[in-house]
Amino acid sequence: MGSVAIGMAVFLAGVAVAWQSSSDPSVVRTEPGPVIEVAAPLDIVEPGLYTPVTEPPAAVPEVVDPSTTAAPAPTEPPATKPATTAKKKAVVAAKSRATSSATAPFTGMGTWVDVFDWSPSYAKGQPVKLGPGAVDAMADNGVQVLYIQTTRADYTGGGDIVDPLVLRQWLARADARGLQVVAWYLPTLTDVGADIRRLKSTATLGSVDGIGIDIESKAVVDHDERSRRLVELSRLARAALAGVPLSAITLPNVVTDVINLNYWPRFPWAAIRPFYDVWQPMSYWTNRKSDSPYRNAELYTRENIERMRTSLGDPNAVVHPIGGIGDRTTPGDIQGFVRAMRQTRSIGGSLYDWSTQSTTSYAPMRAARS
């Protein structure tokens, strides 16, 4: 369901911001792309979701190490049998609203968490920003779907799942509160076999209801080769994860079709269409300058969805858009976001991400509940 700026723009050292505009005069014209590029061995984007920045690039704040909630002790979670019943009820309710079992995990009001929020391995020796108890606040404020990053291509802690004992505590708490859980991963496509292995490991985690594949890495420089590998990964993932609901977390089409045509030319929409159940465009209107028409949350969200459906050749493609960024978003933005969701018949919506989301957004986001 990639991409560090998470509201406060958490990202690795060596960040170089790059943007280009072809037809939107409000966007700063610098090369080469609309995401934060990380000078790391894998050359991936942080934290995995079309990294949020404020235009112009100079406005991006410095990284702040997490320093609040202490990391939970790495112990196995309690049994969650009663919670499973709650989750099943939520799934049944979603299905009763004309959603299929393949789209139910993505239905309603969601929120996002990445490894830089919850994982001790990525906290750089500092306390983690969020512990499993954050799930209670999410549920109390209406969240129905937790999107949580479970693995990364650069994880060196052993195994394919990041800090599995801590992660299981998150999953158990989400299960106990009846939230759907969508695990997400940003494949670099530099080693498709390794990407598939990580996705398969994620699917074996208990309480994971769906998987999101975050499609944005430019680690493979050649556009056509990158597309070929994306199609291969999508095909292999669908075959290996038969029965697992899959979403494609995609770059916003306004960026790739209007603002920066060089980011991923000839993106293989038609070729990957058969392999995904839900489409999740990263429609971060907060990435646009204040004088850009695309800073309008309603317009930006609706146009991204309409362009994506046209590219897919499917006017009925199932969509759950992602808006944001949390602390740069106003209640008015969210109201426009929700209107666009309704206009495009989206099955839900979410803001990126929970750690940056303001309490003033909770009430208007409830309109995204199923």
Image (spheres, rainbow, N blue to C red):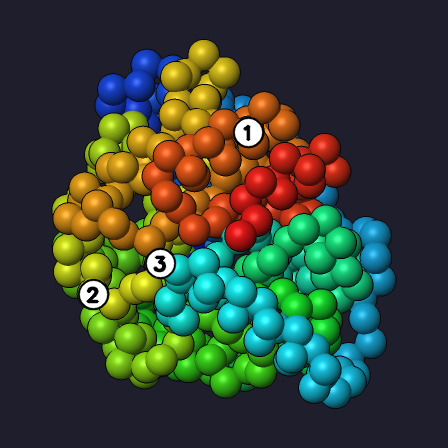
The residue beneath circle 1 is: 335
Q: Position of residue 152 (x, y in %)?
A: 50, 67
The percent position of residue 282, horizontal first and vertical second, equals 42, 43
Instruction: Assign a secondary structure to mark 2.
Output: helix
Name which residue type carries label 3. Answer: Val
Residue 226 versus residue 340 in the image, above or below: below
Q: Quadrant of residue 238?
A: bottom left
Asked if the residues shown at circle 2 and circle 1 are in contact, with their CB atoms under 8 angstroms apart, the answer is no
**Left or right: 323 with respect to 364?**
left
**Residue at 21% across / 61% down in the picture?**
272
Give the numbered dot on residue 278.
3
Give the quarter of the figure containing the N terminus: bottom left
Identified at 78% across, 85% down, the residue is 78
Element assignment for label 3: strand
Residue at position x 28%, y 57% in the image = 220
- Label of residue 78 in the image: none
Judged by depth in the image, the label closer to the viewer, 2 or 1, is 1
- Three-letter amino acid code at the position of disc 1: Gln
Q: Disc 2 designates what residue?
A: 274
Tag 1, which secondary structure?
helix
